[in-house]
Amino acid sequence: MFISQNEAAKIVGLSRQEIWRRRQRGEFPQPVKLGVRRVGYLKSEIDVWCAAKVAARDLINQHKEQSV
């Protein structure tokens, strides 16, 4: 399922401008061109990106706990 840029921004809690910056750095899923003036994001890719952020956080927290 495709979602709009605004929906993707709302889901991840970032502005459209920040999403654009992260896309340029290869740190966010790339949109899919749906029409002449329309792009969308695969919701599944946004979900995977969010899950990766949570996993990275948990790994850092786990490492901190083991260091104590």
Image: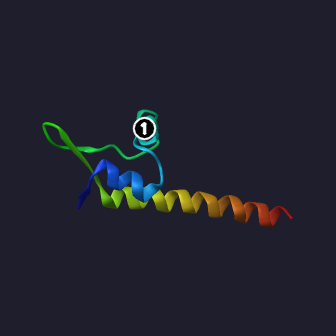
- Quick one: SS at disc 1? helix
Looking at numbered disc 1 in the image, what kind of residue is underneath it? Gln
Task: Residue 27 in the image: state x and y as whole percent.
Answer: 47, 42
- Of 65 and 11, which appears nearest the observer? 11
Which residue is at a point 41% across and 59% down the rendered structure image? 11
Q: Quadrant of residue 36?
A: top left
Task: Residue 15 in the image: state x and y as whole percent.
Answer: 44, 45
Task: Residue 56 in the image: state x and y as whole percent.
Answer: 59, 57
Which residue is at a point 47% across and 49% down the rendered structure image? 14
- Of 63 and 15, which appears nearest the observer? 15
Would residue 41 be found to the left or right of residue 19 on screen? Answer: left
Which residue is at a point 42% across and 33% down the rendered structure image? 24
Quarter placement of the N terminus? bottom left
Can you say whether 58 is above or below 41 in the image?
Answer: below
- Of 33 and 52, which appears nearest the observer? 33
Would residue 22 be found to the left or right of residue 56 on screen? Answer: left
Would residue 34 be found to the left or right of residue 28 on screen? Answer: left
Task: Residue 9 in the image: state x and y as whole percent.
Answer: 40, 51
Q: Which residue is mark 1?
A: 17
